[in-house]
Image (tube, helix red, strand yellow):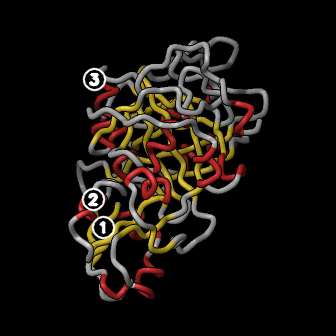
Amino acid sequence: MALMELRSASANVSPSPVAFLGPAGTYTELAALLACPEQPHLHSQGSHPLVPYPTISACLEAVAAGQQQWAVVPVENSVEGGVSMTLDALWQLEGLGIRQALILPIRHALIGRASRLEQIEQVYSHPQALAQCQAWLRSHLPQATLIPTRSTTEELDRLQEQPSAAVIASERAATLYQLPVLACPINDHPDNCTRFWVIGRAPLSRSGQQGETSADPASPGGSHTSLAFSLPHNVPGALLKPLQVFAERGLNMSRIESRPTKKSAGTYVFFVDLENPIGQPYLDAEVVAALESIAETLKLFGSYPVHDLCKQGDLSQVAKALPSEGKARPA
């Protein structure tokens, strides 16, 4: 379904605020504008009030504590891989589930007030953005110091008084802050995309009926299921056992990633995304039972639809389709 056809996806739904990694102008804000958690098999266009938070963890903690109903967070970039802060927070917090996934094209711009690139001494941005532009930065700004920030737009206000500084963010951010774009695109890989998850309260619940997993409103069902597990013993073949559960049932993993448990060296949590079989929008209860018999801890984040907006043109075209945006209110 085309982007323009979904314009009124949530017209009859009273939207709840969506928490996102701020300030205004981040890629996560754009994903939040397109999110439609109440009708996850569609996506909306700017119908939800947005609430910026300073970190990804703060967004998810607000939902876990009941302060916000929804949050949009980045989970994986096609160039730099998983977003560790998102994965760690999902493992540590309780009662969170995935409503939908959005994949957005990423087109980085160098924003600043310098008249020449040679005048730039500092470049600020989120660590992922800096890494995604590292070859361009080495080639065009070898003299600049790279300074990581909590988001791509956190330091844009600095540019008003510091002409020797520049920020890597989106062209949309430059427009919102009324700042010049010095170069665009500067990302090293033109097909750069980031996947975002729309997170809500209440984890997946299992009924065990008809061989399927039932879900509360936090798990709408869809093409993918996400889960995470830790293993009781670090022994040869320990990881093979849960992977055999997937292989024997013909379940394809679209992603597997490990994160430290933070308990002791050499112990890990494994995050897995599964492609649900056609006609089965939830993970089979027998699969869940098999995993529970193997894992030390198993967390089901839910089954959900995925909206790939990379197939609908670049980020500027996606942004142009949005209605006029008001300012997000602070958390």
In the image, what residue type sits under mark 2? Answer: Glu
What's the residue type where badge 1 is placed?
Tyr
Disc 1 versus disc 3: nearer the observer: 1
Q: Which mark is residue 124?
A: 1
Question: What separation in Å lies between label 1 and label 2 (alpha carbons)?
Answer: 7 Å
Q: Residue at x 69, y 27 (%)?
A: 281
Q: Is residue 196 above or below residue 155?
A: above
Q: Residues within 10 Å of mark 1 (few under 14, many from 20)?
A: many
Residue at coordinates 56% horizontally, 14% vertically from top-left?
Answer: 13
Residue 258, by quadrant, is bottom left
For residue 61, which numbered disc appears in the image?
none
Q: CA distance from mark 1 to mark 3?
A: 32 Å
User: Left of 331 or right of it: where is 328?
Assistant: right
Please say whether residue 233 is visible from this viewpoint. Answer: yes
Question: Residue 278 versus residue 270: which sits nearer the camera?
Answer: 278
Which residue bears the numbered disc 2? 155
Residue at the disc numbered 3:
65
Contact (CB < 8 A) between labels 1 and 2? Answer: yes
Quarter of the image where the N terminus is located: top right
Residue type at mark 3: give it: Ala
Q: CA distance from mark 2 to mark 3?
A: 29 Å
